[in-house]
Amino acid sequence: MVDIVMATYNGAQYIDEQIRSFCRQTYSDWRCIAHDDGSTDGTRDILRAWAKREKRIVFIEDGVCGLGPARHFIHILQYSDAPWIMWSDQDDVWFDNKVETMLKAAEKAAFKGAGVVYSNAELWNPAKGVISHRNTLFYPACLREMLFHNSGIQGASSLFNSAMCDILRVPLSAYAMHDHLMLLVALCFGTVIYLDEPLMYYRQHDHNVSGNAPGSKWRKVQLMWRNRHEPVIFNPHYEGTKAFYEHYKAQLKNSDRHILEVYLLLPYCNWFKRFQIIRREHFTLFGSRWILLLKLYLRRYKR
């Protein structure tokens, strides 16, 4: 049994197509738990209609709204009791074999404790077709490789177990995004499996809640230059990481606690000291120390 947890907000233009892609899945033992964050465009009417004609669609109307994407996804987890959970955005389109492929990988991994499987996605615009065959270009294996990304791995590309869900449900004082938190949890307390196989269309349009994806490492470097007015570290991700550290510091391995403490102290260092520490601790960005140091040179560190 797989619970597909879907957070919606003003997605009436796209949501029907996404739900139809659930119904085409080659694995049929799934349930979609949908919750809306206060839409004004008819999204809730579409969800109510789906819930009436498809028993696997459950629309939760608990009066809670205005949460924002991160807290919204975490909020919906309380309604899931399945052994496997998948997060879904409202505007993507899943390939027919997505659930089956990821579930087989998870069962083969036989997680001991918290575990997550990530797949890839094709960047897609309905008017232009496939823009890129890979959305996720780099797969972090440890905190040193993750913390300067200002993100996690795309949440909608994940399947995780109930042990991971139990950890994610614990409330924190701050969140950047739900997928940022999950990658922190996975790298510190769990097991991560990466499938470099696209299993959905990641729709690109002007209204993406989490922004448009660049599509290639070179494109990322170009954007680093173009957006050099932006900081190295986005404050929401810094505060989300800090909240994670403060809640779990007693349970962290010494090596992970050290890396998080160093990361959280970096805003208070001068440029030269920060440069030295990043080199000494082997922090990277997109798998490269030099790309991170270039970004450090081009931009102010943090607002």
Image: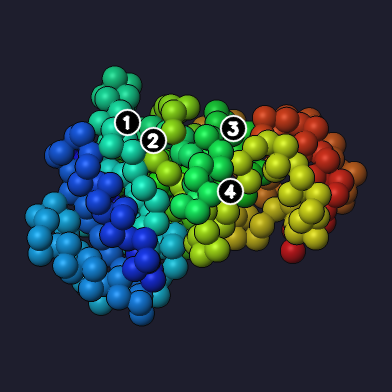
**Residue 199, which numbered label?**
2
> In this rendering, which labeled residue sits more in front, label 4 or label 1?
4
Name the residue type under label 3.
Answer: Phe
| Residue type, label 1 | Met
Location of residue 97 in the rendering, given as x and y in whole percent from the top left corner: 28, 33
Mark 3 vs mark 4: which is more N-terminal? 3
Q: Residue furthest right?
A: 272
Give residue 138's mark.
Answer: 3
Q: SS class of the residue under badge 2? A: strand
User: Mark 1: which secondary structure?
Assistant: helix
On the image, the x and y values in percent for residue 293 come to 81, 39
Q: Tell me what residue is drawn at x 16 percent, y 67 percent.
A: 49
Query: In terms of sequence position, does the residue under pointer 4 or pointer 2 come before the other?
Result: 2
Q: Residue 212, how many percent across, how many down?
A: 57, 54
Residue kind at label 2, given as amino acid type: Leu
Instruction: Say if 182 sits above or below 7 in the image.
Output: above
Percent of width and height locating residue 173: 48, 63
| Label 2 to label 1: alpha-carbon separation | 9 Å
**Which circle, 3 or 4, is nearer the viewer?**
4
The residue to which callout 4 is attached is 213
Can I make out residue 64 in this image? no
Q: Classify mark 1: residues with Cα within 10 Å, few (<14), some (14-19) or many (20+).
A: many
